[in-house]
Image: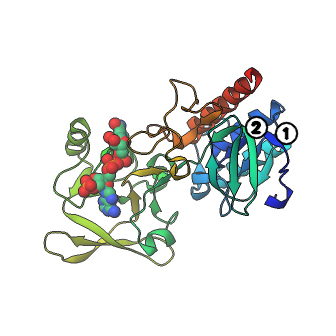
């Protein structure tokens, strides 16, 4: 639905911002609870990070796996079936103070709501290369648990030197013949236990003092162009896969200064609930979670957010 059709004279029960598994699941529960949720899906691509994956093999209930975009489309349709108003636009501004929250969308409409569910997700950090984007899903990935299986018996590269990179590299040794970690410095940032694990794994090699300057290949990735950070030398290295593990950034820019965030920008919630520091504002999915980052855990926390919002609305 476009923004013209969003009822504006109403004080909505709940507005959900974000359309990954967390947002859609929150919408399914809120709609079934007769809260007539409005869900802002985003103006460019609805569905969140799963829209960039291929086959999802670990979402329970799909014996033979499911394509990420198909899974998101099913969740989307399921939320609509129970009466969610889906809006293909962004929320660009929010005032979460007070009992009635106001949200402004990209088309300039202002919505009022008694409760808000924040489900904006997080973004994998990218190296920032043009060919990294072009070959995404064709050799370049940001998620070993999602895509590692497709790199069986191959030699693959992981870029990064933090815990995520070590974790991804270690996971990938299940499938790959060899995993080469490419790190721009000569020491890993990862915790000691993770470093020890990487160094003692016979399938992991570390290429110190190197950075990726290009991803090569026409239809799919065939090699990397790497620069030695000590002497500036650039060489082609044969790899059929690249996993980028250089950190994540929660998409919390919209609520900075209003909702309490941790030092990395993730939204802080109360204990095991989805309650933020503001009454009537709930947060779920990757926006709060830097540990698990799975579709199923995001969906679970979206369910919690809707139940928390429902309880809040009954009490008010
Ligand atoms: P991180 O600790 O911020 O590490 C990011 C790594 O990527 C660093 O080594 C950094 O290099 C490198 N990097 C950043 N930008 C780069 C670029 N443009 N090109 C090349 N390399 C780049 O991120 P993370 O590993 O995702 O970890 C985030 C947090 O989650 C940490 O607190 C971590 O401890 C935690 N975590 C814990 C676990 C676990 O305990 N199992 C697993 C995953 C994450 P430099 O070192 O040179 O800066």
Looking at the rendered structure, the number of numbered marks drawn on it comes to: 2
User: What percent of the width, then of the height, locates residue 233?
Assistant: 18, 77
Q: Which residue is mark 1?
A: 82
The residue most toward the front is: 98
Work out whether mark 1 precedes mark 2 in sequence or the reverse, and give the earlier one. Answer: 2
Q: Is residue 286 above or below residue 279?
A: below
Which quadrant of the rendered structure holds the N terminus? bottom right
Is residue 176 found left or right of 277 in the rendered image?
A: left
Which quadrant of the rendered structure holds the C terminus? top right
Q: Which residue is mark 2?
A: 28
Assign a secondary structure to mark 2.
Answer: helix
Residue 63 occupies quadrant: top right
User: What percent of the width, then of the height, locates residue 84?
Assistant: 81, 44
* Pick the front one: 175 or 199: 199
Assign a secondary structure to mark 1.
Answer: loop
* Pick the front one: 40 or 211: 40
User: What percent of the width, then of the height, locates residue 308?
Assistant: 66, 27
Q: Check mark 1 vs ligand 1: CB closer than 8 Å? yes or no.
A: no
The residue most toward the top is: 315
Residue at position x 66%, y 49% in the image: 19
Residue 178 seen from this side: no
Is residue 195 found left or right of 311 in the rendered image?
A: left
């Amino acid at each position: 639905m476009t923004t013209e059709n969003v009822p504006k004279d109403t004080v909505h029960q709940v507005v959900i911002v974000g359309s990954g598994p967390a947002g859609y699941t929150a919408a399914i529960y809120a709609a079934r609870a007769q809260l007539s949720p409005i869900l802002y899906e985003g103006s460019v691509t609805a569905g969140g990070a799963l829209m960039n994956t291929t086959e999802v093999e670990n979402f329970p209930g799909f014996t033979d796996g499911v394509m990420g975009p198909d899974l998101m489309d099913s969740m989307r349709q399921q939320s609509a079936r129970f009466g969610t108003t889906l809006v293909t636009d962004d929320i660009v501004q929010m005032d979460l103070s007070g009992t009635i929250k106001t949200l402004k969308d990209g088309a300039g409409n202002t919505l009022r709501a008694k409760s808000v569910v924040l489900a904006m997700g997080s973004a994998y950090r990218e190296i920032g290369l043009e060919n990294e984007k072009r070959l995404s899903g064709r050799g370049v990935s940001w998620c070993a648990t999602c895509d590692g299986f497709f790199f069986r018996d191959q030699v693959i590269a992981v870029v990064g030197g933090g815990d995520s990179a070590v974790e991804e590299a270690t996971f990938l040794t299940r499938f790959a013949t060899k995993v080469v970690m490419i790190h721009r410095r000569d020491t890993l940032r990862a915790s000691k236990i993770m470093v020890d694990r990487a160094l003692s794994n016979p399938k992991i090699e570390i290429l110190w003092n190197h950075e990726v300057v290009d991803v090569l290949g026409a239809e799919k990735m065939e090699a990397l162009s790497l620069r030695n950070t000590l002497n500036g030398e650039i060489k082609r290295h044969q790899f059929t896969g690249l996993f980028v593990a250089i950190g994540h950034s929660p998409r919390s820019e919209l609520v900075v200064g209003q909702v309490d965030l941790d030092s990395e920008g993730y939204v802080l919630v109360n204990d095991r609930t989805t309650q933020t520091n503001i009454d009537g504002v709930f947060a779920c999915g990757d926006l709060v979670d830097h540990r698990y980052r799975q579709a199923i855990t995001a969906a679970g926390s979206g369910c919690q957010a809707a139940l928390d919002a429902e309880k809040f609305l009954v009490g008010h």
